[in-house]
Image: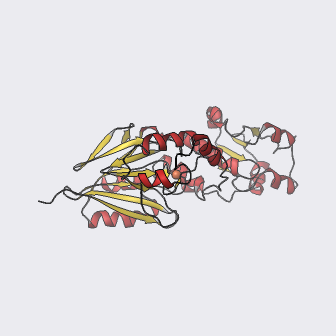
């Protein structure tokens, strides 16, 4: 008879710098996998099989924007149940966990801590002195807050009020690291996290986060809609439109069917100065009020000035379950004008 012990295997996806965690109760051989990545599915299944793990759960911290989850596929292959925080809004969850609720893994409990802010549905998980913090708290960093209903104030409250209250020796296992670091502790992050450690005031953190101006993740246009359906039953051809540009839009626009819409999500002032003829102005940030209207079309082409706002709105609409948005993600109205295409004012 062995003494039960919780083994943690930290696995890495080089492409997206994602950490996947495999938790195993050494006595019962029951296991859970956290934030599994589609591209490393074979590797992860091999480890699960070699170690004789009975996988009970495929747990996700949030709908990732930078990779597609293998949680749905793992469920199909192993019968593991899919666990998300209740507020994630993901389709096809088996166990939506409320804040503070736990699932049993062998001799251990895995407890959900609702930590919105990076996305509105982010959940961290605590088990046996370890915190799996997703993108909420990273090593010497934190998740961005500029899409998927992220909110810096909310992230500050989640980290300071729900994670920094854990004991200082709690091990922090994040969903990513881009600098080769593997783990931290709550005490370390409280002291040294450059974004909000050292008791940085809330407003300073909010200002900092609102001025990061980061590029969009490379795979956001396919990853978010795919992850909303847990990585299965989605048609990648609908989302692999990363190179769709204003010339492609011009071509589509010339013979636009009645059930298609061109949407411009710049400000009303920018729109008034010149837009694609026949396009509809729905400024970024207001798109959620138009979900029902947008659902009436088979296809929605979405552009802005540089592609950045279009990507943000596309992600927000994907979160609302809309999967028919074709995002012009790296060009915009100035390119249309430069090409000499007709402009309506
Ligand atoms: Fe994320």
| Left or right, 294 with reference to 142 | right
Spot occupied by residue 238 in the image (x, y as percentages of width and height): 59, 53
26 w.r.t. 345: above or below? below
Residue 241 visible in rendering? yes
Color encoding of the figure: secondary structure
- Closest to the observer, 249 or 34: 34
Quarter of the image that includes the C terminus: top right
- Closest to the observer, 111 or 162: 162
Spot occupied by residue 103 in the image (x, y as percentages of width and height): 30, 43
- Closest to the observer, 146 or 223: 146
Q: How many marks?
A: 0
202 w.r.t. 18: above or below? above
Q: Residue at x 65, y 58 (%)?
A: 242
Q: Residue at x 14, y 60 (%)?
A: 2
Spot occupied by residue 202 in the image (x, y as percentages of width and height): 57, 41
Give the residue furthest to the left.
1
| Left or right, 215 with reference to 278 | left
Quarter of the image that includes the N terminus: bottom left
| Left or right, 219 with reference to 278 | left
Spot occupied by residue 47 in the image (x, y as percentages of width and height): 32, 66
Q: Quadrant of residue 275?
A: top right
| Left or right, 50 with reference to 199 | left
Q: Residue at x 27, y 57 (%)?
A: 24
Q: Residue at x 57, y 54 (%)?
A: 222
Residue 233 visible in rendering? no
Q: Quadrant of residue 48?
A: bottom left
């Amino acid at each position: 008879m062995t003494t039960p012990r919780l083994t943690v295997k930290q696995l890495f996806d080089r492409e997206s710098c994602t950490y996947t965690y495999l938790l195993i109760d050494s006595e019962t051989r029951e296991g859970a996998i956290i934030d599994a990545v589609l591209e490393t599915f074979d590797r992860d299944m091999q480890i699960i099989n070699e170690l004789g793990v009975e996988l009970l759960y495929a747990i996700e911290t949030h709908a990732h924007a930078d990779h597609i989850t293998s949680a749905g596929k793992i469920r199909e292959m192993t019968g593991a149940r899919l666990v998300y925080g209740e507020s994630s809004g993901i389709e096809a969850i088996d166990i939506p966990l409320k804040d503070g609720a736990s699932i049993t893994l062998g001799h251990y409990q895995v407890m959900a801590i609702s930590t919105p802010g990076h996305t509105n549905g982010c959940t961290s998980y605590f088990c046996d002195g370890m915190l799996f913090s997703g993108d909420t708290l990273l090593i010497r960093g934190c998740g961005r807050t500029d899409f998927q209903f992220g909110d810096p104030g909310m992230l500050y409250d989640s980290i300071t009020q729900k994670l920094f209250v854990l004991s200082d020796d709690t091990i922090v296992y994040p969903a990513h690291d881009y600098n080769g670091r593997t783990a931290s502790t709550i005490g370390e992050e409280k002291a040294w996290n450059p974004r909000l450690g050292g008791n940085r005031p809330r407003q300073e953190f909010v200002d900092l986060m609102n001025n990061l101006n980061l590029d969009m993740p490379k795979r956001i246009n396919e990853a978010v809609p795919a992850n909303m359906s847990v990585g299965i039953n989605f048609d990648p051809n609908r989302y692999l439109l990363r190179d769709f540009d204003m010339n492609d839009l011009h071509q589509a626009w010339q013979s636009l069917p009645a059930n298609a819409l061109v949407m411009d999500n710049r400000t009303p002032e920018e729109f008034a100065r010149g837009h694609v003829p026949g396009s509809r102005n729905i400024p970024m940030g207001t798109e959620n009020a138009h979900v029902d209207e947008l659902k009436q079309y088979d296809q929605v082409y979405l552009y802005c000035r540089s592609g950045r706002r279009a990507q943000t709105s596309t992600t927000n609409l994907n979160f609302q379950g809309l999967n028919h948005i074709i995002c012009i993600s790296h060009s915009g109205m100035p390119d249309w004008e430069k090409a000499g295409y007709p402009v309506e004012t």
